[in-house]
Amino acid sequence: MMPTSTRVSSAMIGPYRIDGLIGRGGMGEVYRAFDTVKQRAVALKLLAPHLAGDVEFQERFRRESELAARLREPHVIPIHDYGTLNGRLFIDMRLVDGMDLDAVLGRYGPLSPQRAVEVISQIAGALDAAHADGLVHRDVKPSNILLTVPGTEGEFAYLVDFGIAAPMAGNKLTVTGTTMGSLDYMAPELFDTGDRRGNRIDVYALTGVLHTLLTGSRPFTADGLAGMMFAHLNAAPPRPTRLRPLPPALDAVVARGMAKRPDDRFATCGELAAAAHAAIVGSPTTWHPGPPARPLPPAPSLPPAGLTSPPPVRARRRWPLVAAAVAAVLLAGGGTVAGVVANSGSPPEVVAPAAGTYTDVYGRFTIQPPAGWSIDPSSEVLAFNSPTNDAQLAVFVVSSLGTLEETIEGARNAAVQFPNGVITSGRKLTLADGTPAYLQTYSYTDQHPGAEAHDVQLVAVRGSELYTLIGSAPASAQAERDTLTAAVQTLRLK
């Protein structure tokens, strides 16, 4: 929720007198209002006017109010009422005067370890109560945590905005063109498997917030949507002690709480809070806000691939970034991507049903790579390397709820998001098995060799899966680009 000082003239919406605008977020606006029936000041959240006709956004708004109204944990702002007023959906909430953590960090800088852990402990109680009721918040971030009288004995933390919360069981709610959650604190499985229901999504995000409170910096500082997604999927968990003198044991707490695999994290937010408290035992417990302080400078930015040093194997430096870029632009460009499936972690075993033809371990597709190209054993996807230069070919699959047309739009957007990305050709075609597909070529600046490169990309949608093949070749390798164009068209879906 973005704070704002905007004032609006008093007006009536149903029984509510609107006294001022408190903040504006992705789904709507929150006003300071007065309930003339119950005679109390409230915070009134209204669906944004331009979204009033969007059925999907209305469903999200209703979901937020229904889920949040169930919760009775003291660190969750209570919901008084919800429904429709003058054709607009609304939520009537307790009005709480305070500052969100973004504002606190901006005014005072990083918190002491003791205060950071205390805030995290309070929010952990709210999240564990929601999880016990079968709810996952999925948007835990500093701006969604409100502090009353920060820095005093009476400081109290509230968790706000369950706008993208989802049941831990049941149907998932999909919103076309909307990134679910905030990229700075999104757990890897939201990209990798699309599972939005596990409570350890919130454990991951709350650990990221702990890192931010301790250091004043986001967990990852990769540039761009694709780079941030790749960092969550592949970069090592951040170490807060690199940015500020802190109890060394906090590094291990953050590493576990932000582990890539959900099962490797703390089982509950309460466990995270307890471990963080244990890490600072013996440290001074007093904290004073002091004069306004400049926040610490951000951590050194990760390269777009999310790596801090050049990797030894070329396939690992490219394909995860490509997958993240495609997924990112499909989210932004119209398609809805649940995530990369079964393409990260250990390399897949590949079997050869016929000479020169390869299939993935899940039996979803076959492909015939160029003659003489070898399988890259280090790649996270089914990938092949040219015997003569840096040319490569890789296949990966994402779970897509978009149409082929939406996928094409996303693929084109992905191509131009690479540095100096230029699409050189594009055409629709039909695969040998009859599946419609789209083939495009584009050039860009390859950041690893520091030279121009050219890609050949084919995308096809069947059911809920998006199949994409990408071949990359140096600018000088025109013959291999032609070979790649022929190779990607050998894709057969099963």
Image: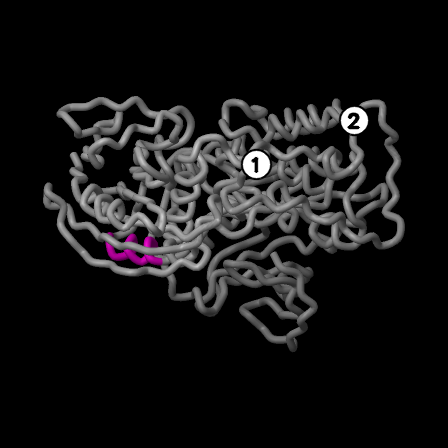
Q: Residue at x 52, y 45 (%)?
A: 228
Element under label 2?
A: loop
Query: Residue 299 appears at what percent x and percent y?
Result: 67, 44
Q: Is residue 324 magenta?
A: no
Q: Amino acid at mark 1?
A: Ser
N-terminal of the pair, mark 2 or mark 1, is 2
> Pointer 2: residues within 10 angstroms few (<14), some, or many (20+)?
some
Closer to us: 84 or 282? 282
Q: Residue at x 53, y 32 (%)?
A: 131
Dominant secondary structure of the residues highlighted in magenta in the image: helix
Query: Residue 287 appears at what percent x and percent y?
Result: 86, 39
Q: Which mark is residue 309?
A: 1
Closer to us: 85 or 270? 270
Residue 230 vs 334, above or below: the answer is: above
Q: Is residue 66 visible?
A: no
Q: Is residue 252 visible?
A: yes
Query: Residue 409 appears at what percent x and percent y?
Result: 31, 58
The residue range painted magenta reads: 404-412
Distance of label 2 from label 1 (alpha carbons): 32 Å
Q: Quadrant of residue 211?
A: top right
Specify whether 286 is left or right of 237: right
Residue position for label 2: 280
Q: Is residue 411 magenta?
A: yes
Q: Amino acid at mark 2?
A: Ile
Query: Residue 1 appears at what percent x and percent y?
Result: 61, 56
